[in-house]
Image: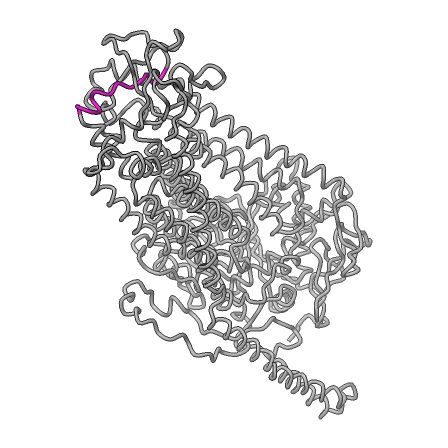
Amino acid sequence: MNRLGKKANETLIEMALSADGEECNGPETISTAGSEIPSSSEGLNSTETTLLIPEHQVIDKRHQSKDSIFFRDGVRRIDFVLSYVDDLNKEWEKKLERRKEFESNLQKAGLELETEDKKESEDGKIFFVKIHAPWEVLITYAEVLNIKVPIRENDIPPMVENPLDCVLFPLRLPEKVMHPEPDYFTAPFSKDKQELYLINDESTFFSPSMRNRIVNYILTRCPYGTEEGKKKFGIKRLLNNGTYTAAYPLHDCQYWKKASDPNCDSERYTLYMEWARFLRFYKEQPLVLIRKYYGEKIGIYFAWLGFYTEMLFLAAVVGLICFLYGLFTMDENMSSKEICDPAIGGEIIMCPLCDRDCEYWRLNTTCESSQYSHLFDNVATLFFAIFMGIWVTLFLEFWKRRQARLKYEWDLVDFEEEQQQLQLRPEYEAKCTQKKKNPVTQEMEPYIPLTSQAVRFCISGATVLFWVSLIIASMIAVIVYRLAVYAAFASLMENTQTLQPISGVLTPQLATSVTASCLNFVIIMILNFFYERIAIWITDMEIPRTHMEYENRLTMKMFLFQFVNYYSSCFYVAFFKGKFVGYPGAYTYMFNRWRNEECDPAGCLIELTTQLTIVMAGKQIWGNIQEAIVPWICNWWGRRKARNNPENLYSRWEQDHDLQTFGALGLFYEYLEMVIQFGFITLFVASFPLAPLLALMNNILEIRVDSWKLTTQYRRPVAAKAHSIGVWQEILNGMAILSVVTNAFIVAFTSDMIPRLVYYYAYFENEHSPMSGYINNSLSVFLISDFPEENKPKENPENFVICRYRDYRYPPDHEKKYMHTMQFWHILAAKLAFIIIMEHVVFIVKFFVAWMIPDVPADVKAKIKREKYLTQKILHEYELEKLKERLCQGDTGATEKEFIATEGRMELSRAM
């Protein structure tokens, strides 16, 4: 079956650097059982047996279907496409030499190439190099990459039918879409055991996603020459220096109609019709087909996003109930009744909210805002905060179970992170100039000296610290804006007649908060734009060893920045605003110039809700614009010429060339977007019970937007394996723990719940209506004559003698004038006690729930054991049959003891 006549344990791409024997900066080999695995940086052996093809001939494309995904012979499948423009500039000869060397080495690796001349392209400028991986290359690298393939159809009975299936039937997709092929027992591929596998057709045995993964592995490691004394290799470098303009696998058809070729599965069309259209938003996702077409890494993302959206439904329902409770009990809120009562709130004169320019004001001017604050500041807030602490644990634990089931169904049980070591980053080995012996493998491998690593990490850390400091500085600038414009808004609203009708709703505090939130959102977007590029640059500078290490480092940098960028303003409003204002006559000032902000008499919670809504909603709207509208416009602009040409001249590779590139970090940004959203609905959910509902509606749209853009607007990504969501799991766990703390502090210090409870149980004045008198009790008295001259308002037309302010201090006629009262300390003690009790209760429940729910379902454990047993049995029986054949043929190497040992191993396996 091996047409190249190579030995079974050799790969077609031997990693030697050049004919003169010069070595590359990289390990020579990485050994595994039964195969000789090439290092990432090794070159191609010039003595390698090659599969050369005849020189390409110019053909009439009218005889070839525009949907063709095959070579001109109609047999060999196109697994990858390279494109380049033959521009006659000063770099032209160098690029030509690189391409010639690179393509020659690809052919030496066993790949088959076919070139489309630029005269055949739609614009007459672009050359296309089509790549096909023959059977010998596929089986060689299937063994190298440890790809699992079918050995027997799965005989484990399916799960017992769910009694709710009849109810959920409208949400189901057709069975042929959900499970496009039978389930098989699988085993890692070995060239020595090809008879063991279910190879019905060599051309379809490896799926297109497996094929493009194998070809991409070769492309990233193929050398193309020596420059500046260093060996250069990899398609990524050739793309960066302009030698090639694009490298991509092909979609199998147009998304809006099936391929005319019966040999094409038209999976892209099926994904579009059943998954990527918004009208299918209520349907389940075809995860098996997504995994088959795009690979496990993209499949696991959509599985996680779908599960997250499902779990949000419960949180959204409970949050909506809590919001409706606040809405229906608005009229029963005694605090807002007293504020709105002309006889109470109308008679309470409040101290000015800024120095000199602000006037005294009556408490009932905040009537509407106090009523609205009750929507979010009520007893249901406490319940919802505790519920969300438990919900996030259920979400994470049940996701572990779903992930374990996917690992079994997608043959990822034995997939460990060590598999990624086969895919060392070519950039790492290209930049490493020194080698050392690995004490485990005894192989020479590249490394970065400790001093160089220390310098790089210091530069990286300093850069991250600088940008985090820049965020904090921008937040301080927004705070200064708040302090500086409040007086201007107060004066504008008082002197502008057209604003009088809405002055009850649009107070100076609310106007300042809304405009500051919008300004903060704009700053967040600008800083994001620049930092994304800085984070990639400093991660590249660190030279991570593997792709996984690269992604993890970039993830932590980006998440730290985004965390501070998006949440800093919310933390300010929740935990700092109104907490350090002092009192009239002794206010505290920022930079000795701007007086610190005060909360509304009804509390700061409504402002936190406003801040959260603007930033969260603005981010989601902007994200959808970036993800859907921008790629669509770019593709429309790129295809505008093609619409004027005959349809049959616009080939499959040209159509895909005009699409956007998904990029290696495409999924990274999708995860980051969702994790930041997860923070909004967990860290500050006590202030906004409707946050899960907004997130649910966004995610229903997000799934379809992501699927639509991936299916219609982007080139087909290279398939990659992943058995989990990676480092994002740990980030979610950390945010889940932090959310319990932040929500406890929000309920205690940002809302008015604890002061109201203390008054209700300890300081009430009316037994029949314990909450009456609360507003008067929560406001302290200040003698206007005690105002320092620099703070005193310019005007006092009604000659007020006293004014009130929000605090618990003794009146001016008391011996402890303006000092905190005992009630203040009682409330503070109650707040601290509440935080401790709530945190302990929620954490105990969280850990108990996590302990009760096993990470791997019992039926999945049983199936894994069953499959391992049957796979081992099949492999042992195969080896036993081979030994019998050798004994019958008189092979002296096959001894009777070897036969007995093999049978004994089978018996031991059965016993285990």
| 612 lies above or below 485 | below
Q: How is the image coloured?
A: one colour
Q: Check the picture and name the quadrant holding the N terminus.
A: bottom right
Q: Is residue 295 magenta?
A: no
* Residue 810 falls left or right of residue 463: left
Relative height, residue 196 to residue 657 (above, below) = below
Q: Residue at x 36, y 70 (%)?
A: 175
Q: Residue furthest front?
A: 815
Helix, strand or loop for the magenta stretch, by majority: loop
Residue 614 image point, x, y percent = 36, 35
Q: Residue at x 68, y 90 (%)?
A: 884
Q: Nearer the viewer, residue 437 or 197?
A: 437
Task: Tell me where residue 741 appears, x and y as whole percent.
Answer: 46, 43
Residue 180 in view in this figure: yes
Specify the farthest residue to the right: 20
The residues colored magenta run 342-354
Indicate the quadrant where residue 341 lies. Answer: top left
Which is more toward the observer, 139 or 69? 139
The one of 134 and 698 positioned closer to us in this rendering: 698
The foreground one among 199 and 305 is 305
Q: Is residue 118 visible?
A: no
Q: Is residue 668 above or below residue 61?
A: above
Image position, residue 328 (x, y; %)? 20, 43
- Quarter occupied by residue 687: top left
Quadrant of the image for the C terminus? bottom right
871 horizontally vs 345: left or right: right
Q: Position of residue 618 (x, y in %)?
A: 37, 36
Residue 349 painted magenta? yes
